[in-house]
Image (tube, rainbow, N blue to C red):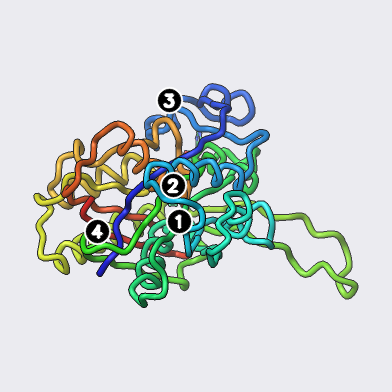
Amino acid sequence: MTVRIIGTGSCLPAQVVTNDDLAQFVDTSDEWIKSRTGIRERRVAKEETTAGMCIEAAKKAMEEAGVSAEEIDLIIVGTITGDYVTPSTACQIQAGIHAVNATAFDISAACSGFLFALNTAHAFIQTGKYRTALILGAETLSRIVDWKDRSTCVLFGDGAGAAVVRAEETGLIAYDQGSDGARGMCLACPGRENNNILVEGKKELGYVSMDGQEVYKFAVSTVPASIQKVLDEAGCSADDIKYFVLHQANLRILQSVSKRLHVPMERFPVAIDHYANISAGTVPILLDEMNRKGMLERGDKIILSGFGAGLTWGTALLEW
Ligand code: UT7
């Protein structure tokens, strides 16, 4: 018994922000952003919320899966930008779709959030107590980036992606996940600091900071190794995999992984050009885009891989 993805959905903010738009606010250029990252534009939330986008994405995934809200017994959301500290985004989704029989909680694993949600759902379903799960990766990163810091604000976007997974005989074949907390501060965003009656002075909320080159080096070494691990565990070679659906942090990272695995770039779908980096949202949004374009057929083997803050990484090999 394993889990299979039986429906996908996504929701993006309406507002497109191009590189030229950003160049009006910070000292940057379309040329720099495109050549260093592959990003042309991103979506930025104005009225949209993390939970609101999740609810829309979830409804689409449930419609494709043909699953009712009552059938969902688990909701797991990978996010670092929920609308509330509590209730969790998952509990907000539960209320929004009336999934009255579900247990709902969030996972904080940044860009690996969707993969951690998938692997956690798999583990829960393996116990036999759960059968159908709604898993999501969603962010409103525009809230936590410093819009005056050109080294980070050009990289990120907002959006939500969802999938319904169910207990089935085929689906998730192998997975690998891990963390390296010792290197965590190379991509960080502080929470609220102590600001109580004992502390003098008002504290400002901090923003995302990143040592881009450290994270880059981590990505181009850890991701191919993690992919190789799941290939070995599944007894597959890279040739057996139709698509490598990777977290979209930088086009150059995708190109480097493609080179290291000796797999042509055509098998690495790209969304970073139009959505930028949506952390936990990137993998499920790209997967939904591929699914809706008809790129995936029953029986195809694909690899999903997320990596980033924590540091964390998660990779899954699955049969569609
Ligand atoms: O999703 C989580 C995982 N995240 C990642 O995997 C991100 C990994 N890292 C990266 O993708 C890249 O390191 C970045 C895209 C973040 C940066 O690219 P880079 O080639 O490593 O550039 P850099 O940070 O070394 O900066 C090069 C230059 C610097 O100027 P000097 O010191 O050479 O004069 C920066 O100040 O580019 C400058 N710069 C910019 N210039 C124009 C930095 N940001 C900008 C900008 N526009 N937006």
Residue to which mark 1 is pinned? 134
The kind of residue tagged 4 is Gly
**Distance between the alpha carbons at the discs numbered 2 and 4:** 18 Å
Q: Quadrant of residue 234?
A: bottom left
User: In front of the other: label 2 or label 1?
Assistant: 2
Q: Mark 2: which secondary structure?
A: helix
| One can see residue 246 in this view | yes
**Distance between the alpha carbons at the discs numbered 1 and 3:** 39 Å
Residue to which mark 2 is pinned? 62
**Distance between the alpha carbons at the discs numbered 2 and 1:** 8 Å
The image position of residue 252, as x and y in percent, is: 31, 41
| One can see residue 36 in this view | no
**Distance between the alpha carbons at the discs numbered 4 and 1:** 15 Å
Q: Earlier in the sequence, mark 2 or mark 4?
A: 2
Q: Earlier in the sequence, mark 4 or mark 1?
A: 1
Residue to which mark 4 is pinned? 171
Mark 2: few/some/many CA within 10 Å (<14, 14-19, 20+) = many
Q: Quadrant of residue 8?
A: top left
